[in-house]
Amino acid sequence: GHHFLDRGGILNLLLGGYQLTMTQYIITGNPISFSYTGNPNNEWPTSIGNQVPNIVATPTWINGGTWKNSGNRFNQSLIQPVIDINAFAYPAPFTPGNAGRNIFTGPHILWTNFSAQKVFPIKERFKLQFRFDFQNPFHNFNFNAPTTQVDFRNPQLFGKITSDQATAGLGGVPLMNIALRLMW
């Protein structure tokens, strides 16, 4: 069964006997709740509960909820919103808003991890393991939740994705690791 990579030879030493692993994560986004600030006619005390806005239309993603066509992602004033603020309104005076908790799903996570490893026997007791790990080889960047505080005095701050996942988290920038391990 080893026509090209038989049990001996330089080809087997370099290319044979690797264990390959690929893990694919497809995760829906975390639930998001909305709040408000700057309501000129509301005196709803925060000690009674959270200040939530009224829903006047179903909140939906603009442009699929990505930074695609969103301007310069490093300058917050140029980032385009991914949720429309016009789906919300301030509650009437002295009344709570009707927006529920966790009514919207945040950005999804699509992340891949690839790994290859091989064990090289040195002597009867000693083995050297070579391992190569590649996180996010397909460059699927995953983003944190957008800003969710409704403020009609400053509507340009609402619904903007201002950060992405960290490298150590799922979906950060691509990261490669090479490791050698001596086993006895």
Image (cartoon, helix red, strand yellow):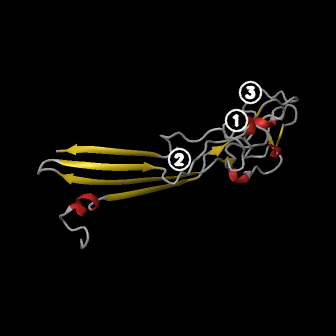
Q: Percent from the top left, x then y, of residue 53?
A: 79, 39
The residue wearing badge 3 is 46
| Amino acid type, mark 3 | Thr
Front of the two marks 1 and 2: 1
**Which label's residue is closer to the chain start, 1 or 2?**
1
**Which label's residue is closer to the chain start, 2 or 3?**
3
- Identify the mark at residue 171; answer none if there is no mark: 2
| Amino acid type, mark 1 | Asn
**Which label's residue is closer to the chain start, 3 or 1?**
3
* Circle 3 SS class: loop
The residue wearing badge 1 is 75
- Residue 116 falls left or right of residue 104: left
User: Is mark 1 in CB contact (under 8 Å) with mark 2?
Assistant: no
Residue sitting at the far left: 124
Q: Nearer the viewer, residue 56 or 129?
A: 129
| Amino acid type, mark 2 | Gly
| Cα–Cα span, label 2 and label 3 | 36 Å
Query: At 76% across and 43% down in the image, what residue appears?
Result: 99
In the depicted structure, whether residue 150 falls above or below residue 136: above
- Residue 95 falls left or right of residue 174: right
Query: At 53% across and 47% down in the image, what residue appears?
Result: 171
